[in-house]
Image (cartoon, rainbow, N blue to C red):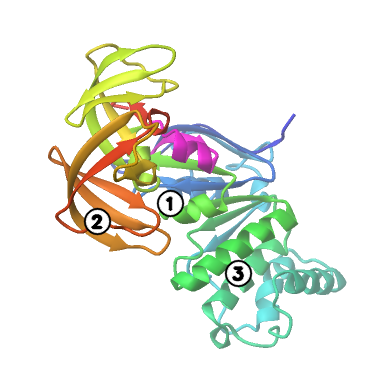
Amino acid sequence: MTEIDVRLRGVTKRFGDFVAVDAIDLDIQRGRFVTLLGPSGCGKTTTLRMIGGFEKPDLGNVEVGGEPVIGSSSNHHTRMVFQSYALFPHMKISENIAFGLRMARKPDQEIRSSCAEIVELLGLLGQEDKYPNQLSGGQQQRVALARALVTRPRVLLLDEPLGALDLKMRKRMQIELKNLQREVGITFIYVTHDQEEAMNLSDEIVVMDGGRIVQSGAPADIYSSPATPYVADFIGETNLVEAVIVSQSEDKIVARSVLGDIVARPTIGLDARENDPVVVAIRPEHFTLGEDVHGQSNQTSGTIREISFLGAVTRVIVESKGLSLSVDHRGRLASSIGDVVKVSFAGDDVVVMSPQA
């Protein structure tokens, strides 16, 4: 049976009249890279801080390693890495890394061997006698990670740790973070508002909104089968179309919209009957632009309003029946702004959701 490193039950946190976290339940398995994802104010950082013992829940229980975080010694199970790194500017890198071990009064030999091991693991050899202001942002981030990991916590908490880095360095550090997590084998709980970062890093994503968990699962599952319009819109680009259920069976759903009748695959968990309003989601990459519509169960037409070259694809905005559809086209685009084009998409790529979900 898989061991649970972190367990939250009925956890609520208020700041005055504002409910930051609203009665959430969450289990995080040992050795997983889990990301709490959502916009500012959704409750992700407050949740992280309660796991670390920096905030006390008003209701509910938080456990790490089977021990309650509040009222026990379980805070030794976790370490936090902040966006600001929080390094001591007056200490050398070696002293920064050893700080937690010295505070725990570990023997000098253990401190030297543990620090040497983590310095090599994080690629910091040769930097030990420098001060933080002599290092790049990426190197400072590695020092912050080394200082947290050298104490061998059960769970590492990361609060938007790459936010201060430029885009290129962020991409590089994402790869390094994921490889590091696999190598050390401990549980990482990561907070970000960047959905692409979450998709790249995570074994599991926990999407939050308004202090609640709205969906959790593997990145591919959340992307392909969002539970709500909010999740569909937040995770990647998507086109949301209002519709009404016309019919549904074990094989398909038919929903009537301004684009016409949309044929879609059955959606797990959809609680809707004939004539009920729904929201249909179609990702830009699931459209086919042009005359080749063979095998596509849904078709419409529209006028090209915008064309943006994005490297691997060309993003085309097609105005159809009063809607602006984002369409990703691979290969050479033969059409121009103002052209009328056909747009098609397969029913298997369509997700139907309840609007109030």
Give the residue at mark 3: 144
Q: Residue at x 44, y 47 (%)?
A: 37
Residue at figure coordinates x 32%, y 27% from the top left: 357
Residue 226, image quadrant: top left
- Secondary-structure class at tag 2: loop
Residue under the point 68% across and 66% down: 100
Instruction: Please determine whether, in this image, residue 272 is positioned above or below residue 296.
Output: above
User: Label 1 belongs to which residue?
Assistant: 195
Would residue 125 be seen by someone viewing this image from the given angle?
yes
For marks 2 and 1 on the same chain, the one whose residue lies earlier in the sequence: 1
User: Mark 2–mark 1 contact, CB under 8 Å?
Assistant: no
Q: CA distance from mark 3 to mark 1?
A: 23 Å
The amino acid marked with disc number 1 is Gln
The 10 Å Cα crowd at callout 1, few under 14, some 14 to 19, many 20 or more, is some
- The N terminus lies in quadrant: top right
Q: Residue at x 60, y 69 (%)?
A: 144
**With respect to residue 351, does 249 lie above or below?**
above
